[in-house]
Amino acid sequence: MPSIPGPLGLAQYPLSSFFYVVEIGDDPKKAVIGASFTEVAGLTQEIETIDYRDGFDLITVPRKIPGRKKYGNVTLTRGVFHRNVEFQEWVNSMIYNDIERKIVRVSLLDSAGLPVIQWILSNAYPIKIEGPSLKSEGNEIAFESIELVHEGIKVEHFGESF
């Protein structure tokens, strides 16, 4: 990875956002690897704040204390390929509130193809699949998207530290 000298030693260039891979499944040998995703959106974490004021406080402004952690739904977008049906089969496997929950790993890679940062979604499952918009006059690529809900994001950083 390229580096430039800086005041604290060697500083690295910011990472490109277009070099990533998505793995779906608990077992790396059986995981669906999606290098063909054109977009991954919604890797968000938010902590709600609670306004709190004790009756004995002398200040009139309420204190802000951390509350529940919330996670956004993650949307994966890719081009439509013939016989690429693993997502539709995942959705079709849901019967009466019984769905296969999977681990989803989104890895940002460096120029050598090694993971630098990885977002790990726990207990993810699809809640929406959107097919392509079809136009008879258009010449665009057909894209589909899948929206995943999950129960948490763990962020891992790899490589050297400063």
Image (cartoon, rainbow, N blue to C red):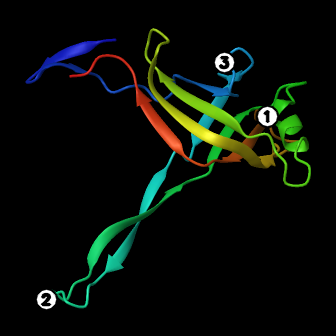
Q: Mark 2 or 3 closer to N-term?
A: 3
Q: Residue at x 45, y 57 (%)?
A: 46
Amino acid beneath label 1: Asn
Residue 45 place in picture, x, y as percent: 47, 51
Instruction: Name the residue at the top extreme.
Output: 112
Amino acid beneath label 3: Pro
Q: Mark 1 or 3 closer to N-term?
A: 3
Residue 40 place in picture, x, y as percent: 59, 38
Q: Quadrant of the N terminus?
A: top left
Could you say whether the residue bearing mark 3 is in a helix, strand or loop? loop
Instruction: Name the residue at the left extreme.
Output: 7
Q: Tell which of 43 and 152 is nearer to you.
A: 152
Label 2: which residue? 58
Q: Mark 1 or 2 closer to N-term?
A: 2
Label 1: which residue? 139
Q: Residue at x 85, y 43 (%)?
A: 91
**51 up-or-down from 39: above or below:** below
- Give the foreground label among 1 and 2: 2
Residues at marks 1 and 2 touching, judged by CB atoms closer than 8 Å: no
Residues at marks 2 and 3 touching, judged by CB atoms closer than 8 Å: no
Label 3: which residue? 28
Amino acid beneath label 2: Leu
Residue 159 place in picture, x, y as percent: 35, 17
Could you say whether the residue bearing mark 2 is in a helix, strand or loop? loop
For label 3, count other residues whose C-alpha is less than 10 Å away and answer few (under 14), some (14-19) or many (20+). Answer: few
Q: Residue at x 66, y 39 (%)?
A: 76
Q: CA distance from mark 1 to mark 3?
A: 36 Å
Could you say whether the residue bearing mark 1 is in a helix, strand or loop? loop
Query: Relative to residue 51, is residue 102 drawn left or right?
Result: right
